[in-house]
Image (tube, rainbow, N blue to C red):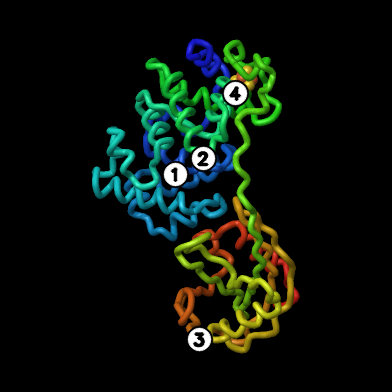
Amino acid sequence: MAPALLPWFDAHGRTLPWRGCGDPYRIWVSEVMLQQTRVDVVIPYYQRFLERFPTVGALAAADEEDVLAAWSGLGFYRRARNLHAGARQVVADNGGQLPRAPAALGAIKGIGRYTLGAILSAAWNDPLPILDGNVIRVLSRLFRVDGAPDRADTLRVLWGLAEEVLPQDRPGDFNQALMDLGATVCKPSGPLCSRCPLARGCEALAVGDVEDYPRPKRKQKLTFEVRVALRIDLPDGRFLLERRPFDGLLGGLWELPGRTVSVGSTAARALGGLVSDLEQDASDLGPPVPVGRVEHRFSHRHWTVHVYQAVAGTPPRAAGTPSYAADGPERRWIDAEELPELGLPTVSRKAIDLSACNQSLR
Ligand code: SF4
């Protein structure tokens, strides 16, 4: 494959900001961001992240709050936590240099077989295969691999093929060429086989069933959750945010105070419980008014959030202090200008934007 694929890559490979730098830290950051996220979405995050944390040492020294803030909107926040923990491990165990030995690199938090191959092959041209969604699609079609790629036995076959086709000469470019071919030519639907450098050896093209590969994954059930969220504004323009518990979905990130509407209950009842819980932090709370609804889809979960807004008549008990914890979750009164400093998931941003439009209360 290499004699056909590498010249194609030299002519048509994508220009990406982490390519050609030979810096394993930058490649590591890019690979973690690219997991489950498109290249065009990742690029601006990658650039901002590296401006803020230009080295492993800078990332290791950062507060988790800052790392999550830089990751805000990119989703799958566990990736950011693992990257941060991994950077601290690299500083503690290896003086801030990513190790080149596969066993040592693979022992770093968050670095699995794919990321290991991507870092070592792209940074040092070491002959290790990679297997991301694009490579899986190309190999599945080239060799008509049966079995869904989320099955362990299919993955074993695919890793074997990725190893088998990897050349000793330019393995790093070869891996990236396979990824680029999957992204730009061997697309999920409507692959451009007439422009493919590997068309002559492609089994699925020869048989005529290209779009039957890869085999479909098992469908994961989508769960639905209804929530209420309440924005409380103070006369000085600050509003209240609450931190989510550290374990679980969006752990440690900030949101408008909110509650899940239990099955069989109502939004009004959930809101009532939320208001009585918040009264200790916001005295003279005015009546909440509905301002709209936010829909947000996570990978296997869908949230419908009914957003309300209220004003607090007097400053909070701990006015003047930036943060304080009541008996329940950590809460903080903030200005809109402070939002970029917080880890704020997209669903929180949508709810805040929606409530910010409601000027009538202020
Ligand atoms: S010939 Fe078509 S199906 Fe086969 S690898 Fe190329 S683009 Fe993919």
Asked whether mark 3 lies closer than 8 Å to ligand 1, one says no
In the displayed structure, would residue 109 be above or below residue 137? below
For the C terminus, the quadrant is bottom right
Asked whether mark 2 lies closer than 8 Å to ligand 1, one says no
Discs 2, 1 touching: Cβ within 8 Å: no
* Amino acid bearing label 2: Leu
Q: Residue 283 in the image: x percent, y percent? A: 58, 87
Discs 3, 1 touching: Cβ within 8 Å: no
**Sequence-earlier tag: 2 or 3:** 2
Discs 4, 2 touching: Cβ within 8 Å: no
Structural distance between the alpha carbons of marks 4 and 2: 23 Å
Structural distance between the alpha carbons of marks 3 and 1: 39 Å
Q: Nearer the viewer, mark 2 or mark 3?
A: 2
In terms of image quarters, where does ligand 1 lie?
top right
**Sequence-earlier tag: 1 or 4:** 1
In the displayed structure, would residue 3 be above or below residue 136? above
Name the residue that disc number 3 marks. Answer: 317
Discs 1, 4 touching: Cβ within 8 Å: no
In the picture, the disc for residue 34 is 2
- Within 10 angstroms of label 3, few (less than 14), some, or many (20 or more) residues? few
Point 57% across, 20% down: residue = 142
**Helix, strand or loop at disc 2?**
helix
Name the residue that disc number 1 marks. Answer: 50
**Helix, strand or loop at disc 1?**
helix
Asked whether mark 1 lies closer than 8 Å to ligand 1, one says no
